[in-house]
Structure formats: structure tokens, C-alpha cells
């Protein structure tokens, strides 16, 4: 995505897909209400593998069992700090656990989101499931969530992989969706956070 020409004067400044394409390049298309599990898996997978330069040594996480863990966590408390465990491995007898410490910021500003992206890597972001978002293509989507607002049930999560600047000096984020390549441009969309929005990220791996 680093070489993408937007055609409107905006440009990318920091792009994790350019440096970690094997980890982030695959666009998935969810088959059920599992965007939460898919986003959490990819964020934790990135945190575990980001410093392993040999792609052959990077280990993908399995989706098995994670959906139920995520749903249970959401029902208890979506904004608390927690570690999510995940078993992974291709061979049943050769599996081990990875635990990540997830932090949630309910009212993150654009500058705070940028700093988290630079420090910790990919970031999960909550968005409204409104018509403009569903039909997003080349244009920039403006996410307008008033500080302290409670999101409606129709919400969705994406992964922020890059940030850039518009022609008039506004920060925008490039986010990867789980709706296949027909959404946005090849599965990616540009988002401007008008004020604040909820985000979550892995701030460290737990032993």
C-alpha cells in the first residue's frame, strides 16, 4: 500500500504493510459475525511475529476457539484491560500458548492513535455500521463519535495499518477491513477521526 497513489494530494507517512506485508497483506472475507475474533487474532499475531525477519519462522495463529473467547469477554466488559490467550500451531501435539496484554482507549484522539501505531504496531478501531461506511470506496470516511458516546449495537472493528496526511494537513488512517477486497480499495479504506474514537491494541506479550 506504500506506493498507492490516492490522487487527491494525500500521502502515507508510515505504512506497516510496506514493512510487514507477509503478516498484514492477506485480506479476509468474514463468513459470520466474527470480525472481532479476526481483528484480535491479527493484532496478536502481528505483535508476536513482527520482529521475526525470516518469514518461514513466523507462526500464524489459529482461529479455533477464539470467537467464543471474544464474545464472552465482550459480554463481561469491553473496556477493561485484559489478556487474551490463544493456542496455535499446525500440529496438535506441537501447540503452545501466546498471551497478549490488550489495552483499550475509549476516547483516543488522532494524535494518540498515531502514537500507538508508531509504538505498538497495528491498532483495532471501532466504527459505526452506517451506509457511508458500508459503501466506502476511494473517498475518505470521516468517523464522528462524540467523546463519551456509547456506540450502537451496529458497530464493527477494523485494523489500522498506516497513517498519512491529507492535502490540508489532517491525519488520516488506512484501515484494513474483513469484508473482502470489494470494500474500499482492495479491502482498505481511509478514515479521518473527527474528534475521538475507541481503539484497542497489544501493549505487550505475557509469559
Image: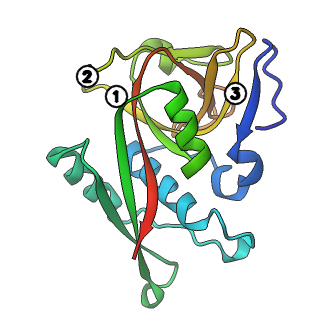
Between tags 3 and 1, which lies in front?
3
Q: Quadrant of residue 32?
A: top left
Residue drawn where x is 28% and y is 24% of the image: 151
User: Are dots 3 and 1 in contact, CB under 8 Å?
Assistant: no
Q: Are marks 1 and 2 in contact (CB under 8 Å)?
A: yes
Q: CA distance from mark 3 to mark 1?
A: 24 Å
Q: Can you identify the residue that label 1 sits on? A: 155
Between 177 and 11, the one lying in front of the other is: 11
Q: Earlier in the sequence, mark 3 or mark 1?
A: 1
Lateral position of residue 158 relative to residue 8, left or right: left
| Neighbourhood count class around disc 3 (C-alpha, 10 Å): few under 14, some 14–19, many 20 upward | some
Secondary element type, mark 1: strand
Q: Secondary structure at mark 3?
A: strand
Q: Which disc, if any, is residue 152?
A: 2
Image x and y of residue 138, in percent: 68, 18
Which residue is at the front of the view, 202 or 92? 202
Report if the CB atoms under discs 3 and 2 are less than 8 Å apart: no
Residue 3, image x, y percentages: 84, 35
Amino acid at each position: 500500500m506504500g506506493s498507492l497513489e490516492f490522487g487527491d494530494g494525500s500521502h502515507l507517512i508510515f505504512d506497516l504493510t510496506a514493512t510487514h506485508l507477509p503478516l498484514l497483506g492477506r485480506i479476509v472475507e468474514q463468513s459470520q459475525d466474527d470480525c472481532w475474533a479476526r481483528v484480535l487474532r491479527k493484532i496478536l499475531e502481528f505483535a508476536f511475529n513482527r520482529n521475526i525477519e525470516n518469514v518461514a519462522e513466523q507462526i500464524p495463529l489459529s482461529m479455533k476457539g477464539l470467537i467464543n473467547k471474544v464474545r464472552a469477554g465482550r459480554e463481561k466488559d469491553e473496556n477493561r484491560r485484559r489478556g487474551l490467550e490463544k493456542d496455535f500451531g499446525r500440529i496438535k501435539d506441537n501447540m503452545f500458548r501466546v498471551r497478549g496484554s490488550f489495552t483499550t482507549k475509549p476516547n483516543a484522539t488522532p494524535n494518540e492513535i498515531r502514537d500507538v501505531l508508531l509504538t505498538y504496531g497495528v491498532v483495532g478501531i471501532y466504527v459505526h455500521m452506517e451506509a457511508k461506511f458500508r459503501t466506502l470506496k476511494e473517498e475518505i470516511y470521516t468517523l464522528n463519535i462524540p467523546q463519551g458516546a456509547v456506540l450502537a449495537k451496529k458497530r464493527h472493528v477494523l485494523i489500522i495499518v498506516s497513517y498519512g496526511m491529507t492535502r490540508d494537513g489532517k491525519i488520516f488512517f488506512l484501515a484494513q477491513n474483513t469484508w473482502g477486497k470489494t470494500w474500499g480499495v482492495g479491502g482498505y479504506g481511509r478514515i479521518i477521526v473527527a474528534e475521538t474514537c475507541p481503539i484497542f491494541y497489544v501493549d505487550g506479550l505475557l509469559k
